[in-house]
Image: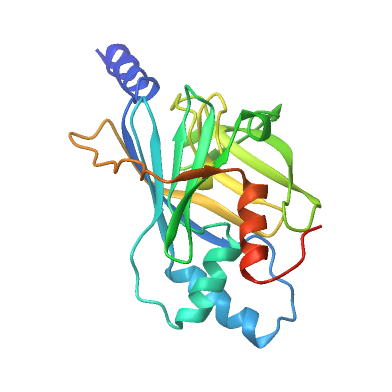
């Protein structure tokens, strides 16, 4: 009987075609001496939480509503952790799309598989929230600075969906922790697998642009000359 119970739990986890996942974010490495503004922005991180809702067709990642200590510091904190709006992931199309605004006009910023799939998988493991996770790394180009930074993802094959925070994923399992540029990390806090109901909003109809095209629109808005 115990064997069948364990087998049932494993099957339920592996076949989790719907789910609701809560993440918290924090600075990955805090320097001993910090500017006063940095200290205040760090306080906003403590108030921030995020929710990933998914089904077998797509996922939606959003920041949960909260009351910030300071509105400007909250915006800085959100931008620092690459959250500029809700993310949608489409595993069949291999696209991650963020909805962002320029002068009240919505845009679909499309990150395609060329920028999402070049993960280097390793055999290194650690346990997160009771799940065995494997380490994967890849380099990502910053479209503004044109410099590369490193992403480290800890994913679990026990929940075999290709999703994760801020549009990252397309790995052989759900990302439970994402470390970006040794700067900040998203870590799972709570998971509900196969809930009775998952409310996932539909993607807004808007102009599709690449990250580079969107950056150019921002530059033009600020009257900065193009490179």
Instruction: Give residue 194's position: percent from left, percent from top.
Output: 27, 30
Task: Look at 46% across and 56% down and name the residue there.
Answer: 85
Q: Residue furthest bottom?
A: 36
Judge left or right: residue 112 versus residue 98: right
Quarter-wise, where is residue 159 in the image?
top left
Front residue of 3 and 140: 140
Instruction: Give residue 204's position: percent from left, percent from top.
Output: 36, 45
Quarter-wise, where is residue 53 in the image?
top left
Asked if residue 9 is positioned above or below residue 134 in the image, the reply reads: above
Front residue of 8 and 70: 70
Instruction: Give residue 209's position: percent from left, percent from top.
Output: 56, 44
Quarter-wise, where is residue 122 in the image?
top right
Task: Look at 29% across and 44% down and name the residue there.
Answer: 201
Q: Residue furthest left?
A: 196
Q: Quadrant of the C terminus?
A: bottom right
Asked if residue 101 is positioned above or below residue 191 in the image, the reply reads: below
Task: Look at 46% across and 36% down and name the residue there.
Answer: 89
Front residue of 70 and 115: 115
- Labels in figure, total: 0
Judge left or right: residue 47 versus residue 126: left
Task: Look at 43% across and 82% down and name the residue there.
Answer: 69
Judge left or right: residue 35 versus residue 187: right
Instruction: Give residue 115's position: percent from left, percent from top.
Output: 67, 35
């Amino acid at each position: 009987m115990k064997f069948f119970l364990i087998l049932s739990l494993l099957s339920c986890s592996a076949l989790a075609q719907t789910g609701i996942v809560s993440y918290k974010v924090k600075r990955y490495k805090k320097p001993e001496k910090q500017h006063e503004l940095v200290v205040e922005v760090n306080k906003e991180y403590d108030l921030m939480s995020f929710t990933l809702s998914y089904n077998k067709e797509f996922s939606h990642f959003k920041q949960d509503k909260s009351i910030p200590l300071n509105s400007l510091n909250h915006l800085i904190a959100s931008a620092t952790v690459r959250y500029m709006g809700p993310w949608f992931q489409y595993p069949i199309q291999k696209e991650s799309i963020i909805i962002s605004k320029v002068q009240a006009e919505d845009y679909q910023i499309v990150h395609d598989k060329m920028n999402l799939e070049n993960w280097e998988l390793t055999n290194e493991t650690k346990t997160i929230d009771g799940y065995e996770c494997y380490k994967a790394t890849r380099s990502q180009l910053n479209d503004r600075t044109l410099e590369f930074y490193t992403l480290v993802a800890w994913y679990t094959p026990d929940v075999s969906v290709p999703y994760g925070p801020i549009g990252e994923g397309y790995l052989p399992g759900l990302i439970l922790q994402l470390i970006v540029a040794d700067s900040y990390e998203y870590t799972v806090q709570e998971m509900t697998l196969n809930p009775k109901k998952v409310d996932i909003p539909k993607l807004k109809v808007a102009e599709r642009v690449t990250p580079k095209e969107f950056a150019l629109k921002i530059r033009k808005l600020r009257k900065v000359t193009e490179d």
